[in-house]
Amino acid sequence: MLYLVSDVKYPVLYLSSGNLINNHTFIHPDRNLNSNVLIIVRKGTLYINQNGVNYDIGPNQFIILFAGQRHYGYKPSEEPLSYYWTHFIINDPDYKYYSPSGLKRNLEIWNAGPTQTPFTKTNYIMPEYGTLPNNNRSSLFFVQLLDTAKRENYAATYRCHYILSFLLLELSTEALFMPDLTKHNIPVAVVNIIEWIRLYYNQPLTVQGLAEMFGYNPTYLSSLFKKYTGYPLIIYINRTRIAISKNLLINDITLKVHTIGKLCGFQDEKLFMKVFKKIEGITPTQYRDTFSHKHMNK
């Protein structure tokens, strides 16, 4: 496991991108490239080896294939497989690779030094692989990248460079810091409820029910949640559901809008439409139409 660290003063250089869709047996080719490749799996499992290590990359997981390192499919994917991919070059001449212990030491050195802009905000810190939260924004930015690339005839424009740079910053944040909530002084109870919502967002969830389950007064629990997440509990539940519905709207065009609402915990289609529009400013159908054009390959 390595971390690629690069100064944010240097936007990455976008080369190409796409959405691989394969409904038959697929095995990744054996290659050693002079560019990096980011892959986020949407469906199925990608079996790939990098630098002698086997990785099984499933839905909502990613891998960065580093420039100059051999990678290849170590076994075929038998089930339908779909993933986003983009090739890019690090523009920072002084970028580095860190082991987990090396990165930790570097962060500790910064923490012991004088007050300054945080190391984590002045650098891309890209893990070799990882898992993204179900409501991750990285996939949404990936769709924006694909849409922009298509609109610009797949040329490597500055717009693509900067969208990809922002995507990698977002991925760094989600992969490194979103799962580790306990390090930000958030009470364990709030962390546990966040995890419960992440797992059971499609089930009936109410403030009263969660308060009883975790032993809290409903009013106190909602205010506690707002203090540490910025949202009252019911709004946090709805925002989680809407974030997941956005992924379904753009990643599975075979699902009808009302079906997506039910899959995300909204039994009332009108309520789904109302909550979605309140949070996003447009309807689910308008959102799907906005991000309907993507470059696909097999």
Image (spheres, rainbow, N blue to C red):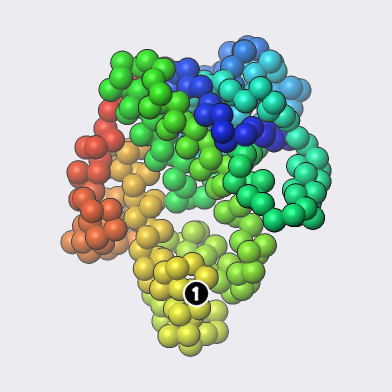
Q: Closer to the camera, 25 or 165?
A: 165
Q: How many marks on residues?
A: 1
- Image position, residue 79 (x, y; %): 49, 29
- Residue at horizontal 74 percent and vertical 22 percent from the top: 51
**Quick check: 263 above or below 255?**
below
- Image position, residue 33 (x, y; %): 62, 13
Quick check: 283 left or right of 127?
left
Q: Closer to the camera, 49 or 123?
A: 123
Callout 1: SS: helix
* Residue at the extreme bottom of the image, as rendered: 217
- Residue at horizontal 63 percent and vertical 64 percent from the top: 184
- Image position, residue 83 (x, y; %): 47, 29
At label 1, the amino acid type is: Lys
Q: Is residue 203 visible?
A: no
- Image position, residue 58 (x, y; %): 55, 37
Q: Closer to the camera, 138 or 83?
A: 138
Q: Closer to the camera, 215 or 99?
A: 99
Quick check: 17 left or right of 101?
left
State the quadrant of the C terminus: top left
State the quadrant of the N terminus: top right
Q: Quadrant of residue 277?
A: bottom left
- Residue at horizontal 56 percent and vertical 33 percent from the top: 9
Q: Quadrant of residue 295?
A: top left
Q: Residues within 10 Å of mark 1 (few under 14, many from 20)?
A: few
**Quick check: 133 above or below 7?**
below
Location of mark 1 (residue):
227
- Residue at horizontal 28 percent and vertical 53 percent from the top: 280
**Quick check: 66 above or below 144?**
above
Q: Is residue 162 visible?
A: yes
